[in-house]
Image: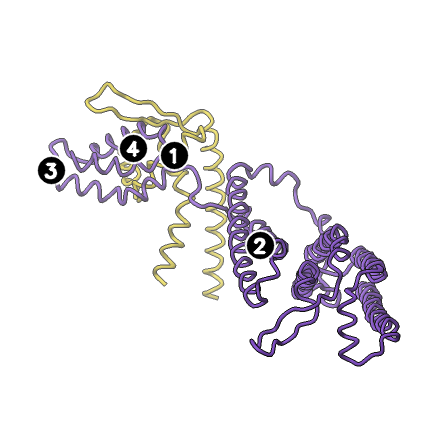
Amino acid sequence: MSELLNSLTTELRRGTLTLAVLSQLKKPQYGYSLVQRLEESGIVIEQSTLYPLLRRLEKQELLSSIWDTTESRPRKYYILSDYGTEVFEALKEEWIKTSSELHSLLKGAEQDGTD
Amino acid sequence: MERIDLYIQEVTRRLPEKSRKDIEMELRSTILDMMPDDYTETDVNLSLTQLGDPAKLANQYRERPNYLIGPKFFDSYITILKMSVTITLIIGVIVAVIDHSIAYSDDIPLLESAISFVGGLVGILIQALMNAFCWVTIIFIILDRVVDDASLKMKKWTPEDLKYIVPIEPKKQISKAEVFFGLFWTAIWATLYFKASDIIGVYEKSETTNKLTFIEPLFNQDVLFSFWPVVVALIAFEIGLNLYKWMVGKWTNKIAIINTIHHIALIIFTLIFFTQPNIFNVAFIEYIGDLFNVQKENLPNIWDKCVWGIVLISIITSVLDSIEGFRKVRK
């Protein structure tokens, strides 16, 4: 049961990761700073998932990146592109809609149970 | 530091050349970010543990699929594979038979010849199957990578598309066994035709060695082989018909008509074949005549009756099978 629950939970979260990542990139972030920001909000993401995800989003032109070589060690900063901002807003709307729908659905189910 | 280098190497060596440099730089700065400036070996181990198995990480970075044939082509791949394996088996048998008839010499005893035939057959079939499997698989691996999803879904599915689908009706259905036996039958008679001068005829048991020896063939080889283009065409027709039956999966008017054409061709061929003046080996007829104590002057007459009896039976069978085809369509 717990194994199945684990894989279902992972599946449920997978789709939200993109949204979570996009939401934090209005200002430029490098890989590890993004990890910390997400963790502060309680979102746990495997680092081995996050870095490849960032590259994929860049390839899909939702993010743009720049290497900052002015500091002691070079860091790759990611930021939302114009297209990415557009997609993020639309995705956010979708999420709010879905979660409120699901919320009332779950609440309804709860009430059915107590009747 | 050394461990970090090794870790990065383990990731990047699995990645395409052009993205290696960038990923390497990014990974290195990330790993360093994860640790305090004066890091110890324990810190390194801790951060590498967080990043996890380098093979898995590399897999996440990789953009190309880590399967050979994806779900969009898998069904067609299996269908085409089954078909080509079947066709390959049939052609393999035919090639083996022809191959063997060319190589055959009269001095080799039947058993030895049969063993060498089976040996050759197995060799040819294994080779042909490997070829079929490899080529079909390679073509589909390429297809899977070249054809993108967009071009596959050019037209949206509508319920109208269903009118092109043949409904499955148990009574009209053509079973796989039927197709298989059809193909098997083709293989048998093709073998018999090409090997007739070595197989069909009189055998005699030698008193001294107790071995069966082939004395007289039934057919006159020259006349028999003069038919080969027609026979090859008939074989091709039968294989084609059976594969078409397999593809459609049920009796339709079209199949019943093609089946009838096939039988008409077969009847015409049989009639022409058996009316050839020198088709039978005279020595064989005489041998049989002696065996049954038939008087010489009666022999041609009786022989003709036997032959025409067999021809008549085959014509009746053909007619019945043609009618049966149409009867199944009407069911």
Q: Is residue B194 above or below residue A54?
A: below
- Disc 2 vs disc 4: Cβ atoms closer than 8 Å? no
- Quarter occupied by residue B175: bottom right
Which of labels 3 and 4 is toward the front? 3
Residue drawn at the location 24% of the way across and 30% of the way down: B29
10 Å neighbourhood of mark 2: few (<14), some, or many (≥20)?
A: some
Which of labels 2 and 4 is toward the front? 2
Residue, disc 3: B40
- Disc 3 to disc 4, C-alpha distance: 22 Å
10 Å neighbourhood of mark 1: few (<14), some, or many (≥20)?
A: some
- Disc 1 vs disc 3: Cβ atoms closer than 8 Å? no
Residue, disc 1: A23
- Hey, what amino acid is under mark 2? Val
Residue, disc 4: A31
Chain A: give its colour.
Answer: yellow
**Mark 4 residue element:** helix
- What is the total number of numbered labels drawn onto the structure image? 4
Q: Which chain is purple?
A: B
Which of labels 3 and 2 is toward the front? 2
